Image (cartoon, helix red, strand yellow):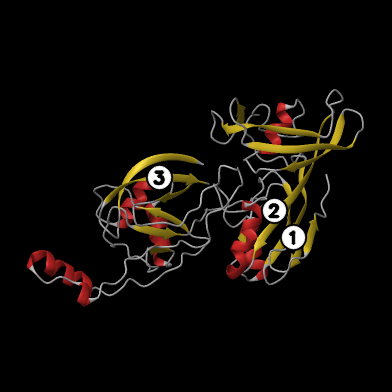
Amino acid sequence: MCLETTTVHCTRCGGGAAGWLMVWDRLDYRYPCCLWGFRAPSERGESHLPSEELVERDLSSVSASQAKTTGSAGRTTLAAAMIPPIPSFTRDAHASTIHLPPGDWTTVLDSLCAHFTTISRAQWLDRIERGLVLDGHGLAIEPDTPYQAGLRIHYYREVIDEAPIPFTESVLHVDEHLVVADKPHFLPVTPAGGFVEQTLLRRLIRRLGNPDLVPLHRIDRATAGLVLFSANRASRDHYQALFRERRIDKRYEALAPALPQVAFPLLRHSRIVVGELFFRMQEVDGLPNSETRIEVIERGGDCWRYALHPVTGRKHQLRVHMAALGAPITDDTLYPVLTEKAADDYQRPLQLLAHSLAFVDPLSGELRRFESRLSL
């Protein structure tokens, strides 16, 4: 995630505010003074997703008795009191959101075309005609909807000629509140970049018929193994808190070069930040913000099997920590050095598996444990 400041004009109060532009998986979220709803990752390093609901702080309707009736200011206040309240709208968890930047465009369509240069005008018109571009109140826009700086727009990402990923996920558990799936290598958890339909989330929504599914955490596209989903909005925050408050035990397995000179078990803690290339991470000096417990579970020749227990959840944390120890995970194309960009090599997946999850269920108090059926 990268951050930069930008000035946007609030669509509710009309004021300009220096807000944050957060770029997360290539989606933009802009926050003027009256708009809220995105929970960024905590400094603890847990990888939280955008909240499933965009919570809006609507202006409360003003009663006539509260309106002052003297002078032009009074007439303005009285007029405001007569405006009906804005209907509430809950954003679809799977829609992307942007607040239109300042500019001199005539229509919303013009602004979207200028902002997303890789998406043609014909593609935007097609989405608009199918009702896949909504305003901040959940109403479908028209091709001639007037442009307004700061206007909130929800849209659904699509990728033309998206390549299929020839591996199938397994559903290990389904109940009223949770879904547990075994993700194969190469399949993204959520839409990003060139993947929308070929993602674990979209596949499970179609397979289970539950559009309310939201992943409670994420693992890399290159990593295989367990992913836990919330299936119920009412109980979602209870399960999100397990990750937020580090009340869940996560165990990974990895194949990597032998480290006979290192004493195990080992606790690796360091400061991990975004590298020179935005998609790679690196260790730097400073206060540690990542921690991993590493054990050896199988010694054999030049390649050992390790158990990795991430205490925090920094991006690529396990891959960075193993590479820093001198034992990069087998078939890692990012660490310690970036290999030449090429198509996915399905014969050489990253040898990293999200093996098990264990936690005390926040609703029942029951100890629950799930284990992947995949192996390295």
Residue hosting label 3: 20
**Residue at 34%, 57% in the rendered image:** 34
Q: Which residue is mark 2?
A: 247
Query: Between marks 3 and 2, how big is the CA–CA gap?
Result: 30 Å
Alpha carbon separation for disc pair 1 and 3: 36 Å
Q: Quadrant of residue 124?
A: bottom left
Tell me which label, 1 or 2, sits earlier in the chain. 2
For numbered disc 1, what is the local secondary structure?
Answer: strand
Query: Few, some or many C-alpha atoms within 10 Å of disc 1 (few <14, some 14-19, many ≥20)?
Result: some
Q: Residue at x 60, y 25 (%)?
A: 285
The residue lying toward the viewer, choosing from 131 and 137, is 137
Q: Is residue 293 left or right of residue 320?
A: right
The residue beneath circle 1 is: 360
User: Is residue 298 at all visible to an observer of this figure?
Assistant: yes
Are the residues at dot 1 and dot 3 in contact (C-beta closer than 8 Å)? no
Residue 107, x across and y down, in percent = 28, 57
**Vertical order, 246 against 343 (above or below):** below
